[in-house]
Image: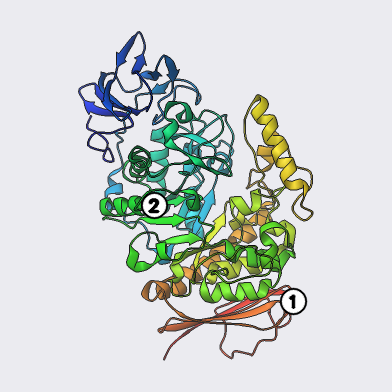
Amino acid sequence: MPPHPGAEPDPIWGAHPLGDGQWHVGLWAPGARQAEVQMQGRTVKLTAGGDGRFAGRIEARAGDPYSMVIDGRVRPDPASRAQVSDVHGASRFTDPAYDWPAAEDYWRGHALSDLVILELHVGLFTPEGTFAAAEARLPELAALGITAIELMPVNHFSGERGWGYDGVLPFAPHPAYGPPAALKSLVAAAHAAGLSVILDVVWNHFGPDGGYLHEIAPDFFDADRSTPWGAGIDFARDEVRAFFRANARMWVEEFHMDGLRIDAAHQIRGGTPGFLEEVARDLRARTTHRPLHLILEDERNLAAPRAPDAGLFDAEWNDDYHHAVHCLLTGESESYYASFAVDPLGDLTRALAEGQVEQGQPRQGLDHPRGEPSDHLPVTAFVNSNQTHDQVGNRAQGERLITLAGEDAARAAHALLLLSPYIPMLFMGEEAGETAPFQFFADFKGDLAEATRNGRAREFAKFESFGGPVPDPMDAATYERSRPYRGDPVHEAAWRGLTQQLLQLRHARIAPLVAANPFPVRDVIRCGPHAVQARFDFGAAVVTMQVALGAPGRFAPLTDTPSFALGDPNTDAHAITVWIEETP
């Protein structure tokens, strides 16, 4: 039983197999006088190595329970790979070995130009809500033309139900979804179906229940900084970097993830070089046989981390595109929509031409300018979406775009998203015209549950358009209301047919152009108060899109037969026509 491939030579954190029933156990507990490992019927003292580090060699079997005992306090291992029960109890010695299918050796993933991502929540994706059950649905996604799934966080969090962003044990898959081996099986099944797997990781905070690192290692956190979700983490410390570096290596090397989406990267601060730069270089040096997709969520709209010559990150969630489309179709103007509600068509024009909208310029409705120029970046540096867990779920009622804007508007926006050259991402059910909401849910108890309820109610009390009565996040009914794929089969089949038609065209005609030239010349103009024409010149061919999103446009006629048409943007309020013309 050799050490897992991502292990450090002398791991600071966690339990690592050495072979012959021996395990290396490490812990950082600055300020502690003594640290021990408690197992069934015995306790083994760890050796203090200075700077708060403790380590030792333990005899145990895979599956045996154990706990850390720090100055007499019994706690779970902060780097636990699996728990016996909940986040407060004992951990398990977990053997990372897995019998991967032979085909896994030949998996080469997808290039950025081929990515079509579906974001999903494992607990809601199927009625069973498990890794194992999700496997059966993968072939139908691949048949539609989806090439990657992005899993919302699967780390162990308190309770049974949650979005995953309140995790407290980043190395342990959430047991309600299945054991670590079941997640590896899901990844193997995805690869067999032709799907890459991207995992959403949360390195910027820990959840409010079961986060014992605050007690074990207070210096893990930055006393001078907090995030909207909890204490800020001090990434200037080597021990902190080692913790999350090992986490990144585990997901990519041990679980064979094809990429990571880093949540709220703007809250990951401290040290030189920055931790994200360090971990990106580390992962790329260790992953050379297949593409590795590193995707940021970062509200700063920075361009430098995605520069191709930097060799760091590939893409970023482009909320600017979402906000422009959303404001244009719904007329909403509150909160973070304020600056995009001033001229949503102008913002959509800029998003199609340059990627980001907010690039450091002053904007009405924006208190402080944000962003950097982005028109020099490849089109593959932007993950565009009409819906995400955030944009749907961070509404009081969790309504989807199709509910807010109507069927025709949603279909036209769907076609624009899937046929523009940027990386498209759908939110589970969107490929089938899902109308069920996606609401905020959790499974906290006692005072924390009540505080969460009250906090959500206060948050939305000041909004009219996306406020209103807030469903109880702790009620299992809120969770069940958010489950997709239970609608009208005829409606869903029609939407799946549209998705498949669009993605067949994308993969056959547009993705090859992006692969050959991810820097097309972009010319985007207004053609009416709710209409835009976008022209993408790849050299070998030109893609022209005429789109109406709210009222017919005034478009110059193009004589050739279009490659795709959904209505007529010269006469219909919501329509799109696309031409793909080879250059002579």
Q: Quadrant of residue 3?
A: top left
- 342 vs 111, nearest the viewer: 342
Q: Amino acid type of disc 2?
A: Leu
Q: What element carries label 2?
A: helix
- Residue found at the far top of this picture: 41
- 538 vs 81, nearest the viewer: 81
| Count of picture labels | 2
Residue 316 location in percent, x, y?
A: 48, 60
Q: Which comes before the other along the chain, label 2 or label 1?
A: 2
Residue 102 location in percent, x, y?
A: 27, 45
Q: Name the residue under label 2.
A: 276
Mark 1 Cα within 10 Å, few/some/many (few <14, many 20+)?
A: some
Q: Name the residue under label 1.
A: 551
Report the mark closest to the observer, 2 or 1. 2
Mark 2 Cα within 10 Å, few/some/many (few <14, many 20+)?
A: many
Residue 50 location in percent, x, y?
A: 27, 28
Please indicate whether residue 188 sits to the left or right of residue 155 in the image.
left
Q: Quadrant of the C terminus?
A: bottom left
Q: Can residue 139 be seen in this view?
A: no
- Residue 241's disc is none
Q: Is mark 1 on a helix, strand or loop?
A: loop
The answer to whether residue 567 is above or below residue 87 is: below
- 176 vs 388, nearest the viewer: 388
The answer to whether residue 356 is above or below residue 204 is: below
For the point 66% across and 87% down, the residue is 555
Please indicate whether residue 149 sits to the left or right of residue 471 in the image.
left
